[in-house]
Image (cartoon, rainbow, N blue to C red):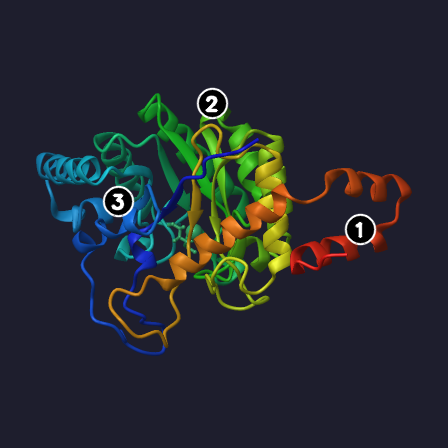
């Protein structure tokens, strides 16, 4: 089964290198200059936040929002690009300091709902079929701060309201267990898929599995993907890597744990992920030490690693694997897998 992979990334993946402990280390590279890079780097899809499409959307009228979205539509057409999703940025504004959908303040929840509606409008205006909910601040710094059961009910109500607001849009929930909150309410694929099934139109509610987020939950990313695939709920993936349980690192795909990366590619390949137009999404951060403008080597490296691992997945000897499984000889299976990954010939 040869899948013709299509890759995507978001403009935030080409960043200025700031971190919480220091300022930008690279000259700002405007979003408008980024679009022309996509095709040259081998990418066809663009992941957007709502304000990547319409900057400063808070102060704009519906007509101004539509006009700006129209410009992005034209840009996408001219560049031959496809919008993969639009995500409401619900973690910058003052009204989202303690979360939006799950905030204790009604005025914050109202802001979050209005922003979600604008996000859906923007998605539709650029011909994009999905919004992504990365629930950045829907959690707590201390658990006593919110009523968790009420929070889950509010999240479900929001999903249902959004499904009613637009009868075609899909909602893809991107779970993450922590950062920026201490404890998030939707930490895993299981939570996202449960919310999907509890919703009024579960076929339009899916999940995005990001490798680093799964590792932060101390779970295996390939299993998180397999779980979503078993329920036809893998809307997309954010491939990257993560060096253990620390801050969200968004390292290059395969750079920390090549074997875990191989297993992610294997599960995607074996389930025909991509045959229905699903994207291989990357969410990778350039190292702060990297010089240049724009820095794109991290995107090239992650894409290349994915394709190398596709080759490894396609040449993985399934008959041999099956034989070892039947014999329950997992020592032999492990050695074969490692030798295969290292390119060791008999
Ligand atoms: C945050 C993260 C986001 C989402 C989109 O950890 O991964 O960039 O992918 O909002
Ligand atoms: Mn992500």
Which of labels 3 and 1 is toward the front?
1
> Residue 325 location, x and y as percent?
83, 42
The residue that appears at 29% across and 63% down in the rendered structure is 15
- Tell me the distance, in whole angstroms, between the alpha carbons under discs 3 and 1: 46 Å
Residue at position x 27%, y 34% in the image: 123
Q: Name the disc covering residue 333, or none.
A: 1
Relative to 85, say whether 91 is above or below.
below
Say what secondary structure mark 1 lies in: helix
Measure the C-alpha gap from mark 3 to mark 2: 24 Å
Q: Which circle's residue, 2 or 1, is located before the other in the chain?
A: 2
Of 301 and 154, nearer the camera is 301
Quadrant in which residue 339 is drawn: bottom right
Residue 50: image tag: 3
In the rendered view, does 319 fall on the left or right side of 129?
right
Looking at mark 1, is its residue's CB closer than 8 Å to ligand 2?
A: no
For the residues carrying marks 3 and 2, which lies nearer the camera in this image? 3
Q: Looking at the rendering, in which quadrant would you find the N terminus?
A: top right
Any part of residue 176 in sight: no
Residue bearing the label numbered 2: 201
Mark 1 Cα-neighbour bin, 10 Å: few <14, some 14–19, many ≥20: some
Local SS, label 2: loop
Which of disc 1 and disc 3 is earlier in sequence?
Answer: 3
Q: Which residue is drawn at 30% across and 75% down?
A: 291
Q: Which residue occupies the foreground of this view, 238 or 300?
A: 300
Helix, strand, or loop for circle 3? Answer: helix
Q: How crowded is mark 3: few (under 14 residues within 10 Å), some or many (20 or more)?
A: many
Kindly tell me whether residue 299 is visible in this rendering: yes
Q: How crowded is mark 2: few (under 14 residues within 10 Å), some or many (20 or more)?
A: some
Report x, y in % for residue 184.
51, 53
Which is nearer the N-term, disc 3 or disc 2? Answer: 3
Q: In which quarter of the image is residue 270?
A: top right
Q: Which of marks 2 and 1 is in front?
A: 1
């Amino acid at each position: 089964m040869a899948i013709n992979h299509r890759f995507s990334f978001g403009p935030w993946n080409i960043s200025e290198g700031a971190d919480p402990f220091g300022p930008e280390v690279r000259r700002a590279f405007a979003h408008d200059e980024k679009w022309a890079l996509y095709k040259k780097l081998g990418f066809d899809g663009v992941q957007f936040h709502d304000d990547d499409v319409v900057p400063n959307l808070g102060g704009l009228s519906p007509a101004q929002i539509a006009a700006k979205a129209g410009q992005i539509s034209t840009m996408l057409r001219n560049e031959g690009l496809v919008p993969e999703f639009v995500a409401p940025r619900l973690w910058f504004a003052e009204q989202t300091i303690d979360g939006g959908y799950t905030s204790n303040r009604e005025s914050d929840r109202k802001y979050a709902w209005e922003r979600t509606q604008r996000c859906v409008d923007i998605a539709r205006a650029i011909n994009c079929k999905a919004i992504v909910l990365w629930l950045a601040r829907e959690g707590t710094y201390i658990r006593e701060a919110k009523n968790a059961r009420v929070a889950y009910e509010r999240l479900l109500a929001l999903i249902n309201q959004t499904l009613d607001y637009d009868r075609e849009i899909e909602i893809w929930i991107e779970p993450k267990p922590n950062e920026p909150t201490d404890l998030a309410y939707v930490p895993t694929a299981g939570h996202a898929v449960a919310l999907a099934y509890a919703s009024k139109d579960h076929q339009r509610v899916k999940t995005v599995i990001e490798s680093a987020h799964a590792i932060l939950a101390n779970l295996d990313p390939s299993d998180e993907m397999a779980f979503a695939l078993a329920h036809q709920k893998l809307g997309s993936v954010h491939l990257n890597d993560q060096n253990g349980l620390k801050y969200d690192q968004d390292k290059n795909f395969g750079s920390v744990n090549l074997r875990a990366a191989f297993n992610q590619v294997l599960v995607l390949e074996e389930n025909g992920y991509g045959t229905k137009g699903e994207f291989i999404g990357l969410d990778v951060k350039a190292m702060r030490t990297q010089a240049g403008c724009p820095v794109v080597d991290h995107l090239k490296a992650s894409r290349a690693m994915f394709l190398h691992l596709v080759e490894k997945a396609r040449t993985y000897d399934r008959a041999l694997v099956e034989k070892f499984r039947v014999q329950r000889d997992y020592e032999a299976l492990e050695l074969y897998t490692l030798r295969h990954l290292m390119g060791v010939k008999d």
